[in-house]
Image (cartoon, rainbow, N blue to C red):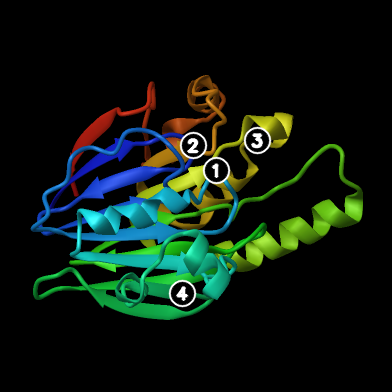
């Protein structure tokens, strides 16, 4: 099963399957031209500005075969609908999702897209998406956010909360994983990815949330003993870079 993946900065990725597109956490960057005959599913993990750009709602003007999967921490009340120019017709294409729930939508043809959510250790949700026997994980801001500036209690609570969620992926085979590798965490930048790889069987890992310090990926690879890992850690060099993978 083929998929084309395009990097759109920070935690933003576009996945193109045979019958559908998935756009995750669009922030900025040039979205490739899309085939209007394919279903477009837009995922937003939470409200932070580097994960949620309200410009996504304008895509409905050109692409009516569209579903929005929006974390419930993004409040789309009447005031917000006016602000974002969300019409009644457009609102019918928006599904607000909460942590630790399961949702099912159509790919626009005969197949279902099954979406499970995890609770983020920051805001919103992470997505575990099953489609035609393949599994895609997009972490949003679900990460082991240990910081040198925080006290021991905060960091211990963070570890407990993260491990509670990541254990839900125990022994799961994940075809594509998109997970934070945040250089701002200094020596602890790798903790979340390490825990993910220790629990799930990941085939392809796309590090994200790099704050334009893409060299962090090579640093991680240099500091990692790959002998015990079957994962392919993907190098990201620039916005707009794409990969075609056979899963």
* Label 4 secondary element: strand
Residue 96 numbered mark, or none: 4
Which residue is at the front of the view, 6 or 68? Answer: 68
Q: Earlier in the sequence, mark 2 or mark 3?
A: 2
Pointer 3: what residue?
189
Residue 29, percent from left and from top = 38, 33
Which residue is at the front of the view, 30 or 13? Answer: 30
Q: Which of the 4 image quarters holds residue 74?
A: bottom right
Residue 90, percent from left and from top = 32, 70
Q: CA distance from mark 2 to mark 3?
A: 15 Å
Which marked residue is nearer to the observer: mark 2 or mark 3? 2
Pointer 1: what residue?
50
Residue 32, percent from left and from top = 22, 37
Which marked residue is nearer to the observer: mark 1 or mark 3? 1
Residue at 40 percent across and 39 percent down: it is: 206
Q: CA distance from mark 4 to mark 2?
A: 23 Å
Q: Earlier in the sequence, mark 4 or mark 2?
A: 2
Q: Callout 4 environment at 10 Å: few (<14), some (14 to 19), or many (20+)?
A: some
């Amino acid at each position: 099963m083929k998929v084309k993946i395009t990097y759109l900065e920070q935690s933003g990725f576009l996945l193109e399957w045979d019958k559908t597109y998935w756009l995750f956490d669009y922030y900025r960057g040039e979205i490739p031209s899309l085939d209007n005959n394919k279903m477009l599913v837009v995922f937003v993990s939470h409200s932070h500005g580097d994960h949620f750009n309200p410009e996504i709602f304008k895509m409905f003007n050109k692409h009516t075969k569209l579903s929005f999967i929006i974390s419930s921490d993004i409040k789309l009340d009447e005031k917000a609908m006016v602000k974002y120019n969300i019409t009644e017709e457009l609102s019918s294409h928006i599904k607000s999702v909460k942590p630790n729930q399961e949702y099912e939508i159509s790919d626009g043809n005969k197949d279902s897209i099954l979406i499970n959510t995890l609770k983020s250790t920051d805001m919103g949700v992470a997505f575990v998406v099953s489609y035609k026997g393949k599994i895609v994980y997009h972490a949003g801001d679900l990460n082991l956010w240990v910081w040198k500036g925080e006290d021991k209690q905060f960091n211990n609570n963070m570890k407990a909360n993260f491990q509670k969620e990541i254990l839900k992926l125990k022994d799961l085979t994940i075809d594509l994983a998109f997970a934070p590798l945040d250089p701002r965490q200094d020596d602890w930048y790798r903790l979340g990815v390490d825990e993910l790889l220790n629990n799930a069987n990941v085939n392809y890992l796309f590090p994200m949330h790099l704050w334009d310090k893409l060299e962090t990926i090579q640093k991680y690879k240099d500091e990692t003993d790959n002998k015990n890992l079957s994962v392919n850690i993907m190098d990201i060099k620039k916005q707009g870079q794409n990969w075609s993978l056979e899963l």
